[in-house]
Image (spheres, grey):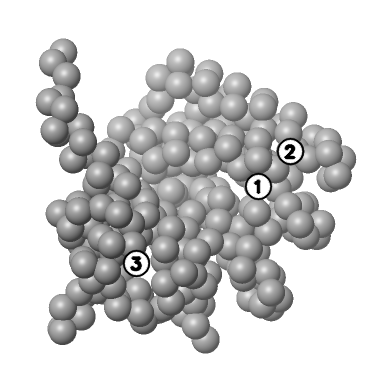
Amino acid sequence: MASKPPQTERAATQSVKAIMGIRELVFSGEVMPGERLSEITVSERLGLSRTPVRAALARLEQEGILEAIPSGGYAVRIFTAADIVDAIELRGVLEGTAARLAAERGVAPARLATLHTLMDELDEIVGVPAEDLNFPAYIARNQEFHETLKGLAGSEMVRRELERVTSLPFSGPSAFLEVQAEIPQFRASLVIGQAQHRAILNAIEMREGGRAEALAREHARLARQNLDHVIENRKLMTKVPGLSLVKG
């Protein structure tokens, strides 16, 4: 298989750097909600040329993080708590669809075996005293489960739309896990979440599409419950990437 020309690889690298750099500026709160971003200022800030920055700004507008403004350039979008709820709900709908289609269409035994191994690893992680819980390991394995679920049905359409909705950091499956690492009362939801992971996998394996869909949608609502805790305790909002964009 022929390798990409060096200039093509450099362009791809610059594009990724631009997207990641702008996301970091926005989600860290360094650029405030409503603040204007232009190609020139972002290029200077990130030390990148304007071409990849222009493409990255357009990409982040498509993801819903930025919005174009009539005077030129982009502004950091302002979100409401209702927007977050809607994003979490939409993720649940899409993950439910992915799980249902996977159950109805069937999943190769090798992929199911890999998921069972992943479930065993998650069981081991959550099956320890709270003070010994390895949160980084849980976050990584939880993310792996949800990434696998995106493509389990073999639907590029579903996978792409899930990528889009989870590009907002507060709507993804790991959005509130960093907060749970510090708040003991949140930790019980990890055990519940893991039980739901196993139930979703079982429903898919048993070819029970309706059950798989309902379980996946219910699983996403754990994030909604954790969101309510975070909003009630405003100081926790700084612990969740992207919540600096939420006003009101």
| Location of residue 139 in the rendering, given as x and y in whole percent from the top left corner | 61, 42
Q: Are marks 3 and 1 in contact (CB under 8 Å)?
A: no
Q: Earlier in the sequence, mark 2 or mark 1?
A: 2
Query: Considering depth in this image, is 86 or 208 the residue closer to the camera?
Result: 86
Query: Considering depth in this image, is 222 or 213 the residue closer to the camera?
Result: 222
Q: Which residue is mark 3?
A: 65
Q: Nearer the viewer, mark 2 or mark 1?
A: 2
- Residue 136 versus residue 61 in the image, above or below: above
Taking the view exactly as shown, the residue that stands out farthest to the top is: 1
Q: What is the number of the mark on residue 193? A: 1
Q: CA distance from mark 3 to mark 1?
A: 28 Å
Would you call the spot at circle 2 few (<14 residues within 10 Å), some (14-19), or many (20 or more)?
few
**Residue at 12 percent of width and 26 percent of height:** 5
Which amino acid type corresponds to the residue marked 3 in the rendered image?
A: Ile
Q: Earlier in the sequence, mark 3 or mark 2?
A: 3
In terms of secondary structure, where does tag 2 sit? loop
- Left or right position of 223 against 17: right
| Location of residue 93 in the rendering, given as x and y in whole percent from the top left corner | 42, 56
Q: Are marks 2 and 1 in contact (CB under 8 Å)?
A: no
